[in-house]
Image (spheres, helix red, strand yellow):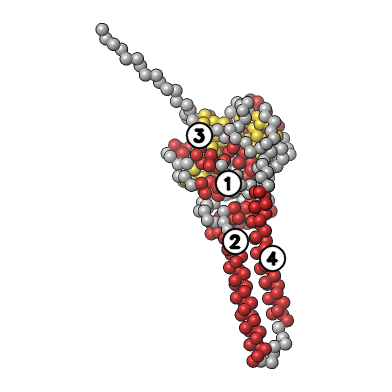
Amino acid sequence: MNSMNPSPEVEAVETPLLSVVIPCYNEEEVIGETMKRLKAFCSGLVNLDVELIFVDDGSSDRTRELLKSFAAEDSRIRLIGFARNFGHQIAVTAGVDAACGDAVVLIDADLQDPPEVVHEMIAKWREGYDVVYGTRIERPGESAFKLATARGFYRLLNLLSDVSIPLDTGDFRLMSRQVADALRAMPERDRFVRGMVSWVGFKQTALPYKRAERFAGESKWPLRKMLRFAIDGILSFSTKPLQMSVDLGMLCASLALAGILYAMGLRLFTNIWVEGWTALMIAVLFIGGVQLICVGILGEYIGRIYSEVKHRPLYIVQEYLGFNQAGPAMSRSPVVVKK
């Protein structure tokens, strides 16, 4: 009599989930094309489920209304609607907080970062990389001033920063679950996501790509906002401006000492000691300007301390749409209307 061994049970293998986070702010003119391109991207995925997490950053146009209509037609679409505009980096943070995927992709809604490039990022992730960040090799449609200031900013940031941040990169990237969880554990308010991703470490690689022109609408990054973003990036990852203010103070003290010796020499050894009004005024104005700069730098750091100790939530969510009853895996918002 032949005994037969029972066949071992075959364990079901879950398909990995990809979370795509798309922050939106007044993107009514482009959001339809964005959805079309994202759906085409999703149709080309192999052995990978996907969720599309749109974060409406308090838009004043029909962006949220259009996103709601898309979500009603496609169960893969999630919507996080802010109670007001909190800013791009906070919107990215809310999307990462809500993402449940084994990998998380950050991409803007303006189609300057082509969704088709994400396929190459996924290939790198499957090779074992935890972060695949897009490096811009071409930026058509942008002014020479913006290109020059962007290049200068990234190089100045690396010169001052204690963390090496890749040149010519934005927030367009893929992150593994480990990196996304590390970001979720970082509570600071003045967020510079691309720098934070560099800070956490793990295995990272660059993916060169050609950035496209904006499909429609206007840029949401005026010069004032770009300068504020640059200051946040520098002050969030370096204390060197404080050290530089000390060095500048020592330089001024040395120049002042040289001026004192020069004045004493004129008084003791010449008859021209009455003159010097112009030099005196220049010295006073120069030292006063340096002092104001140093106080301003110190004030920026103190302001960040003040912002942190208030412990206000990073954002307030007005509504969730497309999530299960439990809502996202994590939210920093204390007040929400979940749908």
| Residue denoted by label 1 | 193
User: Extreme top residue here?
Assistant: 1
Q: Nearer the viewer, mark 2 or mark 3?
A: 2
Judged from the image, the secondary structure of the residue bearing numbered disc 2 is helix
| Residue denoted by label 2 | 241
Judged from the image, the secondary structure of the residue bearing numbered disc 4 is helix
| Residue denoted by label 3 | 102
Amino acid type, mark 1 = Val
| Residue denoted by label 4 | 292
Tell me what residue is drawn at x 60 percent, y 55 percent: 235
**Quadrant (top left/top right/bottom left/bottom right) for the N terminus:** top left
Return the x and y of residue 212 as percentages of the image width and height: 58, 44
Amino acid type, mark 4 = Leu
Tell me what residue is drawn at x 67 percent, y 29 percent: 338
Quadrant of residue 332 within the rendered picture: top right
Task: Kindly tell me whether residue 223 is visible in this rendering.
Answer: no
